[in-house]
C-alpha cells in the first residue's frame, strides 16, 4: 500500500515538472476573470473599545436647539408715537445767566406811589372832638386824601409815615387814628402862639383810612404866614 502511494506520487511529479518548466520559458495568456463568489459569513465580534470622551450637555429636551445669532436685519419703518410717560422729577438748578438789560418802568410801578400833603388855611379852630379837615391841597397822588371828609384812604398797602405841623393859637391835643383805632396822641399845653409837630410810621392795609382828630384842646390855626399841614407818604409797599 505504501509502495503504491509512492509510485503514484512519483508519476504526478513527473507530469508536473514539465509544466512548471514550460511556464517559466513561455508565459501563458491570462484567463477571463471568474464570477464573484457568494458573500462570506459575518466574522466574530471584535473586542470592546476604550471609553470615549463625554459629549456636550443637552439642554433642549426633545425640542430643536437654538442656533447661533444671525446678522442684524435692516431697520424697520418708524412706528407710531407712544403715550407720554410720567413727568420726571425736578432737575438741578442750572447756572445763573447774565443779568439782562433794565426795562422801562411799567404801569404797575406807577401804581406803587402814594403821597399827600394838605394844609388848613383858616384862623378858626376845628370843632371839638372832630376830624380835622385840611382843604388846601399841596400834593395828593390819585386823590387818596379826601378834602371833604378829612380822611386818607389807603390804595397801596405798605409802610407809611404820617406827620403834622400845626400853628398854635391855644392849647392843642391831636389824635392820629387808623379806622377809628388810636395810634398816637400829640399834646401841647402852651398858650402862646408857636408851632408844634408830631409823626410816626405805621403799616396800613388797603382800604383802611387815616385821619387827625381833636380832643378838648383844639387850638390849631392856619394863616398865610403859618399854615397847619398834614402829610403822609408810602415808604415801602408790601
Image (spheres, grey):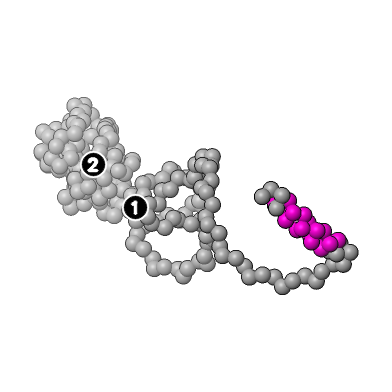
Q: Earlier in the sequence, mark 2 or mark 1?
A: 1
State the SS at label 1.
loop
Are there few (<14), some (14-19), or many (20+) residues within 10 Å of tag 1? Answer: few
Q: Nearer the viewer, residue 92 or 229?
A: 92
Question: In the displayed structure, does residue 158 sit left or right of residue 133?
Answer: right
Residue to which mark 1 is pinned = 87
Say if 49 sits above or below 69 in the image: above
Residue to which mark 2 is pinned = 204
Magenta: main secondary structure equals helix
Rendered location of residue 25, percent (x, y): 89, 64
Say if 174 sits above or below 146 in the image: above
Residue drawn 72% across the image and 56% down it: 8
Q: Quarter holding the C terminus?
A: top left
Q: Tag on residue 113? A: none
Q: Residue at the far right: name it.
A: 25
Residue drawn 36% across the image and 49% down it: 88
Residue drawn 43% across the image and 48% down it: 58
Q: Nearer the viewer, residue 49 or 117?
A: 49
Give the magenta-colored segment's residue range: 5-21
Q: Nearer the viewer, residue 203 or 125?
A: 203
Q: Can residue 219 be seen by looking at this rendering?
A: no
Q: Are marks 2 and 1 in contact (CB under 8 Å)?
A: no
Rendered location of residue 47, percent (x, y): 53, 42
State the SS at label 2.
strand
Does the magenta-highlighted stretch encompass residue 216? no
Does the magenta-highlighted stretch encompass residue 7? yes
Rendered location of residue 34, percent (x, y): 66, 70
Q: CA distance from mark 2 to mark 1?
A: 44 Å
Amino acid at each position: 500500500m505504501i509502495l503504491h502511494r509512492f509510485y503514484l506520487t512519483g508519476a504526478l511529479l513527473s507530469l508536473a515538472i514539465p509544466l512548471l518548466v514550460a511556464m517559466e520559458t513561455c508565459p501563458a495568456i491570462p484567463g477571463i476573470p471568474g464570477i464573484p463568489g457568494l458573500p462570506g459569513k459575518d466574522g466574530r465580534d471584535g473586542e470592546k473599545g476604550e471609553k470615549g470622551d463625554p459629549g456636550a450637555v443637552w439642554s433642549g429636551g426633545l425640542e430643536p436647539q437654538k442656533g447661533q445669532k444671525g446678522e442684524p436685519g435692516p431697520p424697520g419703518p418708524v412706528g407710531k408715537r407712544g403715550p407720554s410717560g410720567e413727568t420726571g422729577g425736578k432737575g438741578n438748578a442750572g447756572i445763573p445767566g447774565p443779568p439782562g438789560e433794565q426795562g422801562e418802568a411799567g404801569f404797575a410801578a406807577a401804581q406803587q406811589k402814594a403821597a399827600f400833603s394838605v394844609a388848613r388855611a383858616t384862623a378858626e379852630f376845628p370843632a371839638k372832638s372832630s376830624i380835622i379837615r385840611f382843604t388846601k391841597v399841596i400834593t395828593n397822588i390819585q386823590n387818596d386824601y379826601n378834602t371833604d371828609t378829612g380822611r386818607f384812604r389807603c390804595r397801596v398797602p405798605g409802610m407809611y409815615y404820617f406827620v403834622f405841623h400845626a400853628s398854635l393859637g391855644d392849647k392843642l391835643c391831636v389824635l392820629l387814628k387808623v379806622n377809628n383805632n388810636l395810634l398816637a396822641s400829640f399834646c401841647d399845653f402852651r398858650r402862646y402862639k408857636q408851632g408844634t409837630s408830631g409823626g410816626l410810621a405805621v403799616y396800613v392795609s388797603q382800604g383802611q383810612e387815616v385821619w387827625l382828630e381833636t380832643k378838648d384842646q383844639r387850638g390849631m390855626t392856619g394863616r398865610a404866614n403859618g399854615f397847619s399841614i398834614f402829610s403822609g407818604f408810602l415808604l415801602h409797599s408790601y
